[in-house]
Amino acid sequence: MKRLFRIFELSKNEQRVVLIVMFALIVFAFVGYERRVHHFLVQPTSAEVESSPSPAEFKDEQ
């Protein structure tokens, strides 16, 4: 069993590399998530507002 856990014994340099890679992956995932959320939420609301007039505007036209 001890032999299996020896793969987790890393030098300081290896620990630093693992932390940097993990941080980069987290940042990449967060940026991708933010892009998807903002891309799909912003466009339908702006298109919806332009296409249908509000009830007050509709009464003013008649």
Image (spheres, rainbow, N blue to C red):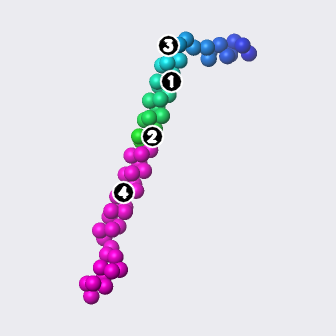
Quadrant including the N terminus: top right
Q: Position of residue 20 (x, y in %)?
A: 46, 24
Which mark, residue 30? 2
Pointer 1: what residue?
19
**Distance (Cα) linking label 2 and label 4:** 18 Å
* 48 magenta-colored: yes
At label 3, the amino acid type is: Asn
Residue type (three-letter) at the residue carrying disc 1 = Leu
Q: Residues within 10 Å of mark 3 (few under 14, many from 20)?
A: few
Residue at position x 33%, y 73% from top?
52
Earlier-in-chain disc, 4 versus 1: 1
Element under label 1? Answer: helix
Quadrant of residue 9 within the rendered picture: top right
Outermost residue to the right? 1
Question: Which mark sits nearer the N-terminus, 1 or 2?
Answer: 1
Q: Amino acid at mark 4?
A: Val
- The disc label shown at residue 8, or none: none
In space, the residues marked 3 and 2 are separated at their CA atoms by 26 Å
- Residue marked by disc 4: 42
Residue, x 42% and y 45% (percent of image)? 34
Please give the range of residues in magenta: 33-62
Secondary structure at badge 4 equals: helix
Q: Between marks 3 and 1, how big is the CA–CA gap?
A: 10 Å
